[in-house]
Image: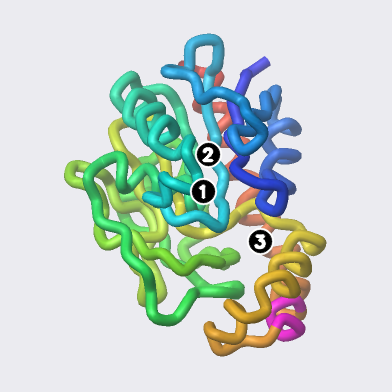
Amino acid sequence: MVRILVIQHEDSVGIDKFGRWLEEAGAELVMLRPDRGDAIPENLAGYQGMVVLGGTAGPEDDEQWEWLPAVRALQRTAAAEESPAFNICLGAQLSAVAHDTEVFRRSIPQIGVMELIRRPEAADDPVFSVLPQRPKAVLWHQEQIAAVPEGAVHLVEGTDAPVQAFRVGSSFWSVQFHPEPDAHTVQRWAEGTAELVEKAGRTPADVIREYDAEASGIEATFRPLAAAFVNYASSR
């Protein structure tokens, strides 16, 4: 059994479908909630992998989200020790900051299902090689990663926020998009962040309909990605 540490920052942004797919592939998920007082470990001893989830914080909102520096430190350690890690949205932004890369606030948020592009570099990647050439994914973010960290491999681009996925070293992946939400989560996000959705030029109802229309294709795209991550972690 592959033990994977999952860092969840708040109730509203869980691991949802991605967690189920990881478990289907043979993972045991160990949930860690720093917002409820759980301590962030210094390394991933005892685990074969890590997932850092998204959240409403910015990646440097350390005053309100006091555990973020410890998460960034763990991400640096995981990358340096080549411990498999998968960082989603805020998790990806934290990993960018941890590797000395700017993250800035967009004037218009990205919200909804958008088409991305798998870059040629992904063809040899042990996880992202399973993606189709033009995957569709849920995007839901105000912050944007300015560039791929120095020395990292750019795996997925697309939209006017071109850094959609990258790998640091051999085993440390980060994605700006969300592979994990189910229909219930998308509805909760859309209705709970209606002002943000409208700032993006959308309506909650429109975003919900869009996700419902694309949900089966999104699952067909990212279930194999979750399995590839577990298979990679189990082989380490």
- How far apart marks 1 and 2 lie (CA) works out to 6 Å
Specify the farthest residue to the left.
150
Is residue 35 part of the magenta span, yes or no? no
Q: Earlier in the sequence, mark 1 or mark 2?
A: 2
Q: Which of marks 3 and 2 is nearer the N terminus?
A: 2
Q: Name the residue under label 2.
A: 52
Where residue 222 appears, as percent x and y from the top left, is 61, 51
Q: Magenta span: helix, strand or loop, mainly?
A: helix
| Residue 53 position (above or below residue 44) | below
Q: Name the residue under label 1.
A: 88
Q: Which residue is drawn at 60% across and 86% down?
A: 198
Q: Give the range drawn in magenta.
A: 204-208
- Please tell me the numbered disc located at residue 8: none
Instruction: Please count the marks in the image.
Output: 3
Rendering quarter of residue 184: bottom right
- How far apart marks 3 and 2 lie (CA) works out to 20 Å
Q: What element carries label 1?
A: strand
- How far apart marks 1 and 3 lie (CA) works out to 15 Å
Q: Give the camera-side residue of 94 and 86.
A: 94
Q: Crowdedness of circle 3 by 10 Å Cα count: few (<14), some, many (20+)?
A: some
Q: What element carries label 2?
A: strand
Q: Mark 3 points at which residue?
A: 218
Q: In this view, does 168 lie to the left or right of 223?
A: left
The amino acid at mark 3 is: Ile
Are dots 3 and 2 in contact, CB under 8 Å? no
